[in-house]
Amino acid sequence: MCTTWPAYSRPSRTTWWWRRTGVLIWLPDLAEWARVVARLLRPGGVLFVAEFHPMQSLVDGELRISTSYFRTGAADREVAASYTGQELPAHVQSTWPWTVGGLVTALAGAGLRIERLDELPVDLRQRHPRMALGDDGLWRLPGDPIPLLLTCLARSVGVGGLGGGVAEGGGGREQR
């Protein structure tokens, strides 16, 4: 796991940056990630985060809370496959817990203004045995008991930085 961000620190220009689902658990330092994103956005540029809600990782198949929302530190486990299911030699995989408050604090602390935060009762795939596929093509738990997805829109209000930037693999829109 890379804990530094050299590939994302060179100057370039962007007005928006998008972050795909399922990535925040791989980041050991949300505050550092948010600072890098803030430096890469031009003033007025936006960051859109769509992420699996951290509540999903707290419940078991019976929808009982099985661990603390406020846990800290890396969770290490022995696995023999990648997160995509590709078979690999057995190895230790580390993920880092995060909270909605931790994400908002990291973004605000980096100088981004939170314009919208939504917690949604839908998911893109079936993660729990009780989930059912809706007519809209999204998965839900009966009665919508917990949020499954989170979206956040944040805007750069800074006047300095690098004048914007594109983080490869982040879905940025390049300006020329």
Image (tube, rainbow, N blue to C red):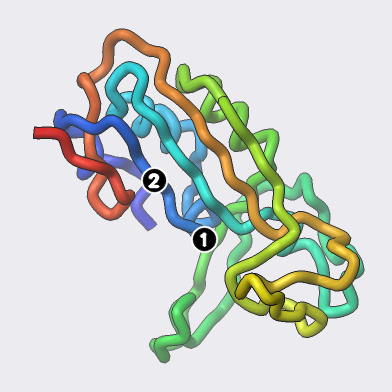
* Amino acid type, residue under disc 1 in the picture: Gly
Q: Nearer the viewer, residue 145 or 95?
A: 145
Q: Residues within 10 Å of mark 2 (few under 14, many from 20)?
A: some
Q: Mark 1 highlights which residue?
A: 22
Q: Position of residue 27 (x, y in %)?
A: 48, 49
Q: Position of residue 89 (x, y in %)?
A: 40, 88
Position of 51 with respect to 69 (left or right) is: left
Q: How many marks?
A: 2
Q: Residue at x 42, y 49 (%)?
A: 19
Q: Nearer the viewer, residue 56 or 146?
A: 146
State whether residue 166 is above or below residue 108.
below
Q: Residue at x 23, y 39 (%)?
A: 166
Which residue, as the protein is rendered here, is positioned at the far front? 135
Q: Mark 2 highlights which residue?
A: 18
Which residue, as the protein is rendered here, is positioned at the far left? 176
Q: Residue at x 53, y 50 (%)?
A: 50
Q: Nearer the viewer, mark 1 or mark 2?
A: 2
Which residue, as the protein is rendered here, is positioned at the far top? 159
Q: Identify the element where label 2 is drawn.
A: strand
Q: In the rendered image, which quarter contains the N terminus?
A: bottom left
Q: Nearer the viewer, residue 119 or 6?
A: 119
